[in-house]
Image (cartoon, rainbow, N blue to C red):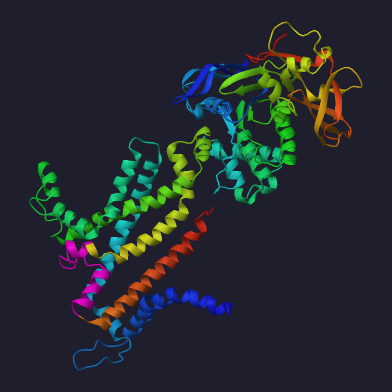
């Protein structure tokens, strides 16, 4: 009887999870082995054909490499910035609340709106960046329009957006560190930097692990500002894996192939998350 | 030479004077106890000496050097915190030599000092553990170890034993005192526990509301308290301090003979100096008794005042029993009721 009650209590949450998470995930994996139905032609089992297409698709490889660069470009920098900002606003400074709020604001703003503002910053000729650089006599440059700088531009937006969010986690963790530790370290002659390196940073490791896993997932999930700012262009220079997936699935309606990309994307994320826990867990001190 | 000297030091937080015009000095090799109830400014004083807070006014000297405006690290003091302030991610060994590493002491010297401190404190078997794997008493020793290896001439302790159980506290009390004497260091020790002050100190500074109430040897505070506050703070159970008029009104002038001149006098008698007598003395009625084993506390009422007697052995007295209390003339203390000061 008790067991039935238990399952009944679990039922609503489980029904939603199965319906919207587990079932679609499994269905996607199955779909990736089937062809895309077109008109009168139904879906047929094609085995690994969709994966074969993927291997031969140059845009897939470009997107994968872009995604990796995007991750490498955004994650370490946004985490470093987050720690820096958190340490700064954790100290007693004038206007601390205001600065904290300012750092957190990008997180609150909707990405679509933010992307449009940044679009203006990067606009050729009269955009903010151009105007500022122009006053220093730098030559005009189409930041979002040239393949060499477009990815860098969207990376900057992502860092700006993410760092403040991660800062909140670091700030919370810093406030858990008893103030006596700083005093003890100061009495021992430790400089601000030594205290950070030997005490604060190691004690922040659990937070760093958590933030890192989230940052990696976030980097591979980013799509909204790509859609607004570049639509993957120019010449797929900013096409991230998820954006490519979106195009294949909902512009080209090649759902079979899209399912295959999804499976690969999920596999990459799972592998990264496992790897992080496996490598970092041992170095993390949990209180 | 004086080890620690404060000259007219004050610390003001907003409108609160946490420390008001404190002046004292302690000699090298002494164990100085800063004693007082919570909020009296004793911890503030210690933090000012350490440099963790800066004085609002006045001058602080350590070993003849003016340190008033120096940062904590430049003052050549070590400190043991109430919460121990151990670094939770570092092993016991790393915790102890943290400061030596920061100060770039050579590795061989570090190892030698660590070994000496660990042997002295019985930590040798625990060096690889993390603080969370230690008991309260062991954590306390690690904090002590960190203070010892610094080899500073002055060591500050902020209520180091308050988180330990009673038995361990008594043990650590003796150990800290022995350590201080063996190393010959000057120690400033903050506590609210007057037993710690009495048993450990060479010099006690009793504080109240940010001011120094009395500065002297433990025996001086016990035998010649300068104020009613000192009289009642030092010694357990606290000294009976009741208006002299109450004694007179109770019907006996004998115990008051030889009182100094002056109106509104208060009479102080320690419970351990009160005796029961068959005749004479002060009539009182018993309100309660507490049997402690070696002696019995007898709570009585004299007129409208409470009076406690601490009598050896086991005394059976029912509440309401009539007794007569007496004491030696020499064990009386006289205070002015208005100023609270001692009157000779």
- Residue A268 part of the magenta segment: no
Which sits in the foreground, B131 or B151?
A: B131
How many numbered discs, if any? 0
Residue plotted at (77% across, 9% down): B259
The quadrant where residue A85 appears: top left
- x then y, percent, for residue B286: 82, 30
Which sits in the foreground, B3 or B214?
A: B214
Which sits in the foreground, A171 or B248?
A: B248
Q: In the image, is residue B240 above or below residue A286?
A: above
- x then y, percent, for residue A274: 44, 67
Which sits in the foreground, A159 or A99?
A: A99
User: Does residue A159 appear in this view?
Assistant: no
Residue plotted at (18% across, 63% down): A228
Q: If the image is split into quadrants, where does the N terminus of chain A sit?
A: bottom right
Residue plotted at (68% across, 31% down): B193
- What span is in magenta? A225-252
Residue that sits furthest to the top in the current view: B261
Q: In the image, is residue B241 above or below residue A99?
A: above
- Residue A234 part of the magenta segment: yes
- x then y, percent, for residue B298: 82, 30
In the image, A170: left or right of A220?
Answer: right
Q: In the image, is residue A16 above or below residue B279?
A: below
- x then y, percent, for residue B143: 62, 39
User: Does residue B237 appear in this view?
Assistant: yes
Residue plotted at (48% across, 47% down): A176
């Amino acid at each position: 009887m008790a067991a039935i009650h238990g399952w009944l209590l679990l039922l609503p949450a489980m029904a939603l999870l199965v319906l919207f998470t587990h079932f679609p995930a499994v269905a996607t994996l199955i779909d990736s082995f089937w062809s895309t139905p077109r008109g009168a032609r139904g879906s047929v089992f094609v085995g690994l054909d969709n994966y074969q297409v993927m291997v031969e698709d140059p845009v897939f490889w470009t997107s994968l490499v872009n995604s990796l660069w995007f991750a490498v470009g955004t994650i370490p920098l946004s985490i470093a910035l987050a720690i820096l900002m958190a340490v700064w606003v954790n100290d007693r400074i004038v206007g601390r609340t205001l600065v904290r709020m300012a750092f957190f604001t990008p997180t609150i703003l909707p990405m679509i709106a933010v992307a449009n503002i940044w679009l203006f910053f990067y606009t050729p000729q009269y955009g903010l960046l151009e105007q500022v650089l122009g006053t220093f006599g730098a030559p005009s440059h189409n930041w979002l329009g040239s393949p060499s700088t477009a990815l860098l531009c969207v990376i900057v937006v992502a860092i700006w957006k993410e760092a403040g969010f991660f800062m909140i986690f670091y700030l919370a963790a810093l406030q858990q560190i008893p103030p006596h530790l700083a005093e003890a370290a100061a009495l021992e002659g430790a400089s601000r930097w030594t205290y950070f390196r030997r005490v604060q940073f190691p004690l922040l490791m659990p937070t760093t692990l958590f933030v890192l896993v989230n940052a990696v997932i976030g980097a591979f999930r980013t799509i909204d500002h790509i859609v607004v700012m570049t639509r993957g262009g120019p010449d797929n220079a900013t096409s991230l894996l998820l954006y490519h997936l979106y195009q294949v699935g909902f512009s080209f309606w090649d759902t079979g192939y899209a399912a295959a990309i999804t499976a690969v994307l999920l596999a990459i994320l799972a592998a990264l998350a496992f790897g992080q826990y496996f490598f970092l867990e041992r170095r993390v001190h949990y209180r | 030479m004086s080890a620690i000297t404060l000259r007219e030091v004050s610390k003001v937080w907003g409108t609160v004077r946490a420390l008001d015009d404190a002046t004292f000095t302690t000699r090298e090799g002494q164990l100085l106890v800063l004693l007082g109830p919570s909020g009296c400014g004793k911890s503030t004083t210690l933090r000012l000496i350490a440099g963790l807070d800066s004085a609002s006014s006045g001058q602080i000297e350590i070993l003849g050097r003016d340190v008033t405006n120096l940062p904590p690290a430049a003052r050549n003091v070590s400190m043991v915190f109430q919460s121990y302030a151990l670094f939770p991610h570092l092993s016991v060994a790393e915790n102890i030599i943290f400061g030596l590493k920061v100060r770039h002491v050579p590795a061989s010297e570090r190892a030698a000092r660590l070994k000496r401190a660990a042997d002295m404190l019985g930590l040798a078997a625990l060096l690889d553990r993390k603080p969370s794997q230690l008991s309260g008493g062991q954590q306390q020793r690690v904090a002590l170890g960190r203070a010892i290896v610094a080899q500073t001439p002055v060591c500050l302790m902020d209520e180091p034993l308050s988180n330990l159980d009673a038995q361990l506290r008594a043990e650590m009390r003796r150990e800290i005192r022995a350590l201080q004497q063996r190393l010959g260091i000057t120690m400033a020790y903050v506590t609210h526990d007057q037993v710690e002050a009495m048993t450990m100190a060479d010099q006690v500074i009793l504080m109240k509301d940010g001011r120094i109430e009395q500065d002297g040897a433990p025996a001086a505070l016990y035998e010649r308290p300068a104020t009613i506050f000192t009289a009642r703070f030092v010694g357990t159970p606290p000294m009976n301090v009741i208006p002299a008029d109450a004694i007179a009104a109770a019907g006996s002038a004998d115990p008051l003979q030889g009182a100094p001149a002056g109106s509104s006098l208060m009479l102080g008698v320690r419970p351990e100096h009160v005796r029961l007598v068959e005749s004479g003395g002060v009539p009182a009625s018993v309100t309660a008794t507490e049997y402690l084993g070696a002696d019995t506390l007898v709570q009585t009422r004299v007129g409208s005042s409470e009076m406690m007697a601490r009598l050896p052995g086991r005394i059976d007295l029912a509440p309401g029993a009539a007794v007569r209390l007496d004491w030696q003339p020499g064990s009386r203390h006289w205070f002015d009721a208005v100023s609270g000061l001692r009157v000779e």
